[in-house]
Image: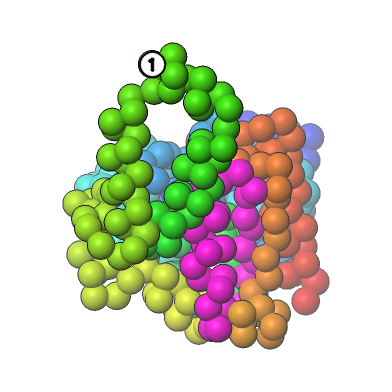
Amino acid sequence: MTEPAEDWTEQGVVFPCQGEALVGVVSRPARPGPLGLIILVGGPQYRVGAHRQFVHLARALAAEGVASLRFDFRGMGDASGAERTFRRVNDDVAAAVDALEAAVPDLEGVVLWGLCGGASAACLYGPHDPRVKGLVLVNPWLTAETTAARVFVRHYYLKRVVSPAFWRKMLAGRVAAGRSVRDLVTRLAQARGRGNPAGGGGRDPAEATDPLPDQVLRALAHFRGRTVVQLSGDDYVARTFEAGLMRTAGFQALTREEAVLTEHFPEDDHTFSGPGGRERLAQAAARWVHRLAAT
């Protein structure tokens, strides 16, 4: 079904992937630019996104002349098949690129846009498909437990210790002191590289021998297009990326070569849910796609 607008339309699409059916929505301007955009979701969610974030993004891009596709990975939303981690969605992304090219035949390439795990999926896929001309990685997920624990201790527990409100709650018996201490001890052990990482049971087995930060850095180094990393100011995932990958010599070399750029959004949280957040995110995406198209 197509939803008419002043200068763009929306159309539902169903397309194949390894014997399963993926479901998506193409937002198509009346006069599409040379580059389209594929929206990759992060975590266990579907093509609408938190607070209808991906709907707003796709429509805002269409109003700026950028065609896009937002879709469900296998096992999520309305797609068939078994659920899989973001490390196992290369076939889904390839099928989505095929679907957008079929819906908008004059495209000269695509940009992959992803949030959190979707950003990591975009990064891992990009080097394998010459049709991908650019990456927009929003608060990429690295699953580096040691670095994440250090960030959490520094930015969460230290804030609590110096907060008068925390001590008032503690004295009033509204904080479970024993549990808080146990949590802190666990985080400190993780920060020092000891103990079982939180959520370790859900880790992809590949992480044990090939940590995701290493994979992401290799992918960025091998990607032939341009990449922008967009980081929120109020987000532990972004802080983990800054404290980990951004400090490595490899990442810094890529930024010096301008193969990778970074943009900061100091007032926004992980999903840009605050006032004006969705608009800032959409404007930044449109700006990046137009910049790539111009070069």
Image side of residue 120 versus residue 283, left or right: left
Residue type for callout 1 = Gly
- Residue pictured at 64% horizontal, 74% vertical: 260
Q: Position of residue 140 (x, y in %)?
A: 50, 58
Does residue 174 show up magenta in the picture? no
Q: Residue at x 69, y 38 (%)?
A: 277
Residue 210, position in %: x, y?
29, 75
From what the image shows, is residue 121 above or below residue 56? below
Range of residues picked out in magenta = 223-251
Q: Residue 20: horizontal and vertical position, in percent?
A: 27, 51
- Horizontal arrangement in the rendering, residue 136 relative to residue 244 (left or right): right
Q: Which residue extends farthest top? A: 172
Number of dots carrying numbers: 1
Above or below: residue 173 compared with residue 4: above
Q: Secondary structure at mark 1?
A: loop
At horizontal 62% and vertical 70% (from top left) the residue drawn is 227
Q: Residue at x 70, y 56 (%)?
A: 264
Is residue 226 magenta-colored? yes
In the image, 193: left or right of 158?
left
Q: Is 177 displayed left or right of 286 in the figure?
A: left
| Residue 236 in picture, x, y percent from top left | 51, 49
| Quarter placement of the C terminus | bottom right
Residue nearest the viewer, comparing 260 with 57: 260
| Residue 164 visible in the current orientation | yes
Residue 102 at least partly seen: no
Q: Which residue is mark 1?
A: 173
